[in-house]
Amino acid sequence: MALFTGSGSGIAAQNWINSQCSRLAINESKLHDPYTGGEVRYVDFTSGQCSLEDTVFLSTMLIKLYYRGGL
């Protein structure tokens, strides 16, 4: 399962269906959406890998996404 937000979320989701890789899907989205950019941040709940330095930030971000209807 993957969750994508932002203007490139549709492109990323479509790519993820084929690749099953969130980072690859977001990087592909960067090529097609002018508003998608910057560093790719991810959390892989299966492996525990994470590109976020601060788990407090992660918790806060997930709560905000939930209340905005992003989850």
Image (cartoon, grey):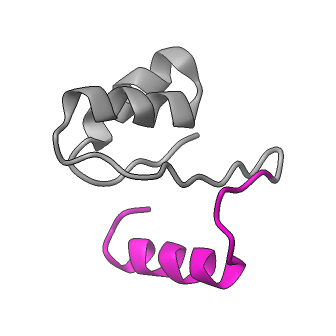
Residue drawn at the location 65% of the way across and 54% of the way down = 43
Front residue of this view, candidates 35 and 68: 35
Quadrant that contains the N terminus: top right
At which x and y percent is residue 47?
Answer: 83, 45
Quadrant that contains the C terminus: bottom left
Which residues are drawn in magenta? 49-71
Q: Splitting the image into 4 quarters, where does residue 56 fall?
A: bottom right
Q: Residue furthest right?
A: 47
Q: Residue furthest top?
A: 18
Report how many numbered discs are placed on residues in the image. Answer: 0
Q: Residue furthest front?
A: 38
Query: Looking at the image, is 7 positioned above or below residue 30?
Result: below
User: As drawn, is 36 to the left or to the right of 57?
Assistant: left
Q: Splitting the image into 4 quarters, where does residue 28 fall?
A: top left
Front residue of this view, candidates 25 and 1: 25
At which x and y percent is residue 63?
Answer: 50, 80
Residue drawn at the location 52% of the way across and 73% of the way down = 62
Residue drawn at the location 31% of the way across and 75% of the way down = 68
Query: Looking at the image, is 67 positioned above or below residue 24?
Result: below
Residue drawn at the location 32% of the way across and 32% of the way down = 29
At which x and y percent is residue 19?
Answer: 54, 18
Q: Is residue 57 magenta?
A: yes
Front residue of this view, candidates 14 and 52: 52
Q: Is residue 64 magenta?
A: yes
